[in-house]
Amino acid sequence: MGTGDRFENKADEVKGQAKQGLGDATDNDRLKNEGRADEAKAGVKDKVEDVKDAAKDLFGGNKNN
């Protein structure tokens, strides 16, 4: 899929890691949980992009016209 989508997913993952780190440093469980959720969301979105790419390859969506 688009490089922009992959970039956004990676940004969400990094944001989640930062929230978790800050939550650990401040002993803030809410922030740690938000970070975990952000990372999980990014992982799911990345897998969806993988499926879209595989479907495009399988069904010929990457042909040059």
Image (tube, rainbow, N blue to C red):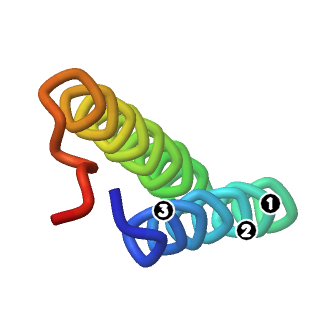
In the rendered view, does 20 fall on the left or right side of 52? right
Tell me which residue sits at (46%, 39%) in the image: 43
Q: In which quarter of the image is residue 52?
A: top left
61 lies above or below 19: above
**Dot 2 corresponds to which residue?**
18
Tell me which residue sits at (60%, 51%) in the image: 32
Q: Do the residues labelled 2 and 1 touch (CB within 8 Å)?
A: yes
**Dot 1 corresponds to which residue?**
21
Q: Position of residue 13 (x, y in %)?
A: 59, 57
Disc 3/disc 2 C-alpha distance (Å): 18 Å
- The amino acid pointed to by label 2 is Ala
Disc 3/disc 1 C-alpha distance (Å): 23 Å
- The amino acid pointed to by label 1 is Gly
59 lies above or below 10: above
- The amino acid pointed to by label 3 is Arg
Q: Which of 39 and 24 is in front in this view?
A: 39
In the rendered view, does 14 fall on the left or right side of 51? right
Q: Nearer the viewer, residue 53 or 6?
A: 53
Identify the image quadrant of the N terminus: bottom left
Q: Quadrant of residue 2?
A: bottom left
